[in-house]
Amino acid sequence: MILAAGRGERMRPLTDTTPKPLLEVHGKPLMQWPMEAMAAGGFTGLVVNTDWLGAQISGRFGPTPLMDDGVALSISYSDEGRDFGGALETAGGIVRALPLLGEVFWVAAGDVFAPGFRFTQAAVDRFLASGKLAHLWLVPNPAHNPKGDFGLSPEGLALDAADEKFTFSTIGLYRAALFAAPYADIPAGNPGGVKAALAPILRAAMNNRQVSAELYTGPWTDVGTPQRLQQLNAGTPPAAAA
C-alpha cells in the first residue's frame, strides 16, 4: 500500500494545485520511487489511498501503469475523499483498504524518498516466520525529528519507551490482525470512515512485544517542506537500482 491521501499543508503553495505525492524528485513523482521499488521486488499489486486532488493521482497512473523499468503494476485506489469527504489518517486509511490487501502487506508513504530501500520477499519470509504483527524500518533521526519515535531492543523489538529512539521511516510490513481487536476497534473495511492514527495501535502492540524493527541507514528524506524538496532536486540523482 502506498499512502497518498495527505493534504501536504507544510508544502503549500506547491500542494495547492498538485498532491504532494506527485511533486517530482529527479524527474519522477515522489510516489513513483516506492512504487518502482516495490515492483522491482516482485510486489506488483498495489493499493493507493487518495483524498486531496486524488483524481490527479489516479489520472496520472491509472489502473495498470508501466514503470520506467518496464514492469507493469496493478493498482486499486481507495478514494477516501470521494467516499468520506476527507482523509482517514494512516490507520483509518489502512483499515479502509484491508479488503483490497492480503493478510500480510507492505505500507510506505508516498511522500518519503528512500531510493536505496529494497522491498524483498526475503524480508516478508522473515516477517512471516517471526509471528509478529508488524515489522518497522527505523532511520537515524533527522534534524526535524531529533527525539525520534521508537526504540530498538538488542533482540530486534520495537520499543515504545527507550533511552535512545529512532525515527519511523513509514516503511513497514503488517499483518491484517494488527488492525483488529485488541489493538484497533474500527469495523472491518472502515465503512463509517473512522479517522485513526497508526502510532497508538503500534504502541499498544509494542507493549505486547508484537512489533519488530530494524535500522535502515541508506538515504532517506521525509519530503515535508518545499526546502527539502528543493535540496533533493539540487543534489545528485540516485544511481539506478541494482
Image: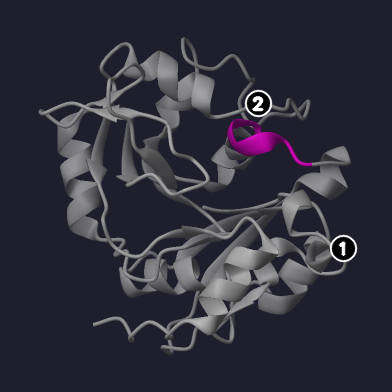
Work out whether residue 64 or residue 208 is closer to the camera in this orientation and state it.
208
The image shows residue 73, relative to residue 153, as above or below, that is below
Q: Is residue 30 above or below residue 27?
A: above
Res 58 quadrant in image: bottom right
Instruction: Look at mark 2 in the image and give the residue it sits on.
Output: 196
What amino acid is at disc 2?
A: Ala
The answer to whether residue 19 is seen in the rendering is yes
**Residue at image mark 1:** 16
Task: Check the image and report above or below for 80 versus 231.
Answer: above
Q: Which residue occupies 30% across, 81% down? A: 241
Viewer-proximal residue among 94 and 22: 22
> How far across and down, in percent of the image, does residue 59 sit?
77, 75
Task: Identify the residue shown where x is 44% and y is 74%.
Answer: 36
Q: Quadrant of the C terminus?
A: bottom left
Q: What secondary structure do most residues of the magenta stretch adopt?
A: helix
- Secondary structure, mark 1, is helix
Percent of width and height locating residue 122: 17, 55
Most distant residue in the left direction: 155
Q: Earlier in the sequence, mark 2 or mark 1?
A: 1
Residue type, mark 1 in image: Asp
Q: Secondary structure at mark 2?
A: loop
For the record, the magenta segment spans: 87-92
Is 89 within the magenta? yes
Is residue 86 shown left or right of residue 105?
A: right
Question: Which residue is more in the foreground, 49 or 73?
Answer: 49
Q: Position of residue 227 (x, y in %)?
A: 64, 66
Q: Can residue 7 be seen by looking at this rendering?
A: no
